[in-house]
Image (tube, rainbow, N blue to C red):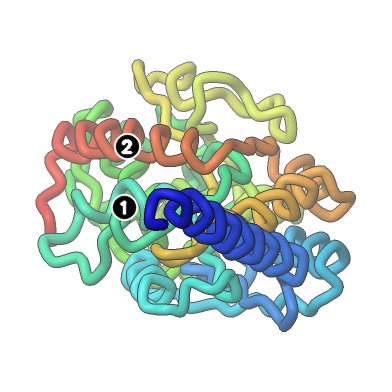
């Protein structure tokens, strides 16, 4: 009797298992289809008006339209993005808190700070890259320096006299690399974000800064700042008359930045996939295209796996740059 009932029992067990698996699969599918079911928060590590903020707001419009839910952009600037990154790392991994960030929090900070209150890798689920851009060396329009050469001449004549501001790790490291490659001594003044540094630059509290193009270009076009050089290997199409810093005499200079989206670690693959789908489409929206064109940057999207690999490579790269620049962890 046992021999005749065992196959039947196995068939009943298998049928039950298949039903449960089907139900679980349906549950995941339904969850993916129902996301988002409430407002999403885009957590931005930098101040309103910064490049990351501008991109986040452009993408927020597109994601809101696709997901039929509001997207709230929350700026938590300060401490080179660490405040926002830490908050995002501790958030529920349900897809409703999205960190829209840069290489500052995900690749550079671990080399700049001895105690990081979040883990750039373990605490996050990569979603997609969003964009890449460059920076620009600026001074006030009433500054006596009309070229990188004139600026360097003054810096060499009076070491430690000129000051540069920075409101992100990208801006900080760009300035430190400028010092290192030009063999000059400049005083670093830290700020919560690049727009804050721009305010003091316009007010005469600092002499120069290397800022992201989306923050600097409007001030340049508005006649408030003078561009002396762009940080990338090629000239920026928005500033075709401005030489690269390398062309201007600081040989080997090349420094860019990138944007990306992350969820807290533990986010389910279906939610990651749905969010990625909306963000990738968002980079092609009219608002995002206007941001990229207006800042001289470009859209750049990835799979989660590609972003994870890229982040690992960038972390090593930024570590080398920071070490070479002689920057000691704070």
In the rendered structure, find residue 121 and report the number of the disc placed on it. Answer: 1
The extreme bottom residue here reads 38
Percent position of residue 321, x then y: 24, 33
Residue 159 sits in quarter:
top left
Q: Is residue 312 visible?
A: yes
- Along the line of sight, which residue is nearer the eye, 13 or 125? 13
Is the residue 124 above or below the residue 244 in the image? below
Q: Is residue 228 left or right of residue 327?
A: right
Residue drawn at x 16%, y 32% is 324
Percent position of residue 136, x then y: 53, 41
Q: CA distance from mark 1 to mark 2?
A: 9 Å
Residue drawn at x 25%, y 34% is 316
Percent position of residue 217, x then y: 67, 48
- Along the line of sight, which residue is nearer the eye, 81 or 266? 266
Q: Is residue 58 left or right of residue 88?
A: right
- Along the line of sight, which residue is nearer the eye, 187 or 121? 121
- Along the line of sight, which residue is nearer the eye, 255 or 200? 255
Label 1: state its secondary structure: loop
In the rendered structure, find residue 312 and report the number of the disc placed on it. Answer: 2
Work out whether mark 1 precedes mark 2 in sequence or the reverse, and give the earlier one.
1
Could you classify mark 1 by the number of other residues whose Cα lies within 10 Å: few (under 14), some (14-19), or many (20 or more)? some
């Amino acid at each position: 009797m046992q021999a005749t009932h065992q196959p039947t029992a196995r068939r009943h067990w298998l049928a039950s298992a298949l039903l449960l698996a089907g139900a679980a699969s349906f549950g995941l599918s339904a969850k993916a289809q129902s996301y988002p079911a409430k407002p999403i928060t885009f957590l931005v590590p930098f101040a309103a008006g910064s490049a990351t903020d501008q991109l986040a707001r452009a993408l927020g419009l597109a994601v809101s339209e696709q997901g039929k839910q509001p997207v709230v952009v929350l700026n938590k600037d300060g401490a080179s993005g660490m405040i926002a990154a830490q908050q995002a790392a501790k958030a529920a991994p349900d897809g409703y808190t999205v960190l829209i960030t840069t290489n500052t929090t995900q690749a550079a900070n671990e080399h700049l700070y001895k105690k990081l209150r979040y883990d750039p890798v373990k605490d996050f689920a990569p979603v997609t890259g969003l964009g890449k851009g460059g920076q620009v060396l600026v001074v006030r329009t009433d500054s006596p320096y009309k070229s990188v050469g004139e600026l360097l001449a003054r810096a060499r004549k009076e070491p430690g006299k000129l000051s540069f501001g920075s409101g992100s790790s990208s801006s900080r490291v760009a300035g430190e690399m400028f010092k290192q490659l030009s063999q000059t001594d400049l005083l670093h003044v830290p700020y919560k974000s690049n727009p804050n540094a721009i305010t003091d630059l316009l007010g005469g509290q600092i002499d120069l800064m290397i800022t992201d193009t989306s923050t600097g270009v409007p001030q340049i076009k508005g006649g408030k700042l003078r561009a002396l050089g762009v940080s990338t290997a090629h000239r920026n199409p928005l500033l075709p008359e401005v030489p690269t810093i390398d062309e201007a005499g600081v040989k080997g200079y090349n420094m860019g930045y990138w944007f990306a989206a992350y969820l807290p670690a533990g986010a389910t693959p279906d939610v990651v996939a749905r969010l990625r789908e909306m963000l990738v489409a968002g980079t092609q929206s009219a608002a995002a295209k206007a941001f990229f064109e207006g800042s001289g940057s470009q859209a750049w999207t990835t799979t989660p796996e590609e972003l994870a690999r890229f982040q690992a490579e960038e972390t090593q790269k930024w570590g080398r740059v920071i070490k070479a620049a002689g920057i000691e962890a704070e």
